[in-house]
Amino acid sequence: MARPRTPLLSRERIVAAALALVDAEGLPAVSTRRLAAELGVSGPSLYNHFRTKDEILDAVADAVCADVDLSMFDDGTDWRAALVAWARSYRAALAAHPNIVPHLAQGPGRRPSQLRMADAVYGAMLDAGWSRAQATRIGAMMRYFVAGSALGSFARGFVDDAALYERDYPHLDQAHLLAEHQQRVDEGAFETGLRALVDGLALRFPAGDAGTARDAPDA
């Protein structure tokens, strides 16, 4: 029997094609018609694997999060070091695909990789002695911070034009140089914020915020 001229369609192929579109052109570029054209199949054939465009984007977001390392929550690492290591891995995964972040930031929904991640972080905080309420807030806070840092570049937001700043914005007299040092500026900002968050949590831990109200998720 002759092999089909095009590879058989699969969820993995659809997700890979959708991720490539998101990376190259952003979320608006993804449609079932466009994906079908990219894959060389008819539009209706996609519905054998996904019912809607949102389901495809959910699968793309979940595939990105599947690359996040969670091992630090299972190997006995101190909760502070675990949060730092996880946040770095999480940011690296999102920074590689920043265009998917707005969809991913809607929350885990039914996405398995994101739910596993939420479960790992929340469980580790409970095991460390934080209350249910505080564990919930810590997980939310870290997600806000990491997603925001991966969404775009702070340094690239400033134009390379010294004249723009020198007259009306005297405190920004070096802002025209930021884009030139984008990686160092952005990564330094992330590391500064990450350390401030975790160190701040550590200061609160002995004060009695952890280990109380364990039965209420938002007490």
Image: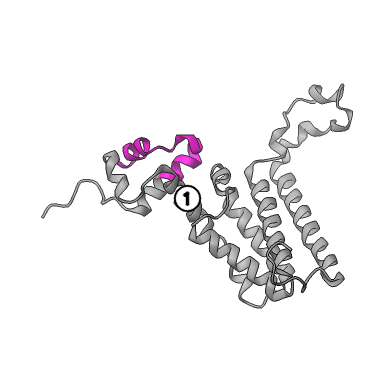
Q: Amino acid at mark 1?
A: Asp
Residue 53: x and y, percent? Answer: 41, 42
Residue at image point 54% right, 59% down = 114
Residue 94: x and y, percent? Answer: 58, 50
Q: As drawn, is 135 to the left or to the right of 39?
A: right
Q: As drawn, is 196 to the left or to the right of 32?
A: right
Q: Which quarter of the picture shows residue 116?
A: bottom right
Secondary structure, magenta segment, majority class: helix
Residue 62 in sight from this viewpoint: yes
Q: As drawn, is 172 to the left or to the right of 18?
A: right
In this rendering, is residue 150 above or below 79?
Answer: above
**Disc 1: which residue:** 58
Residue at image point 79% right, 22% down = 164
Mark 1 residue element: helix
Residue at image point 61% right, 75% down = 74
In the picture, the quarter occupied by the C terminus is: bottom right
Residue 22: x and y, percent? Answer: 48, 41
Residue at image point 77% right, 53% down = 193
Is 172 in the magenta? no
Q: Which quarter of the picture shows residue 202?
A: bottom right
What residue span does the magenta drawing correspond to? 18-41
Residue 67 in sight from this viewpoint: no
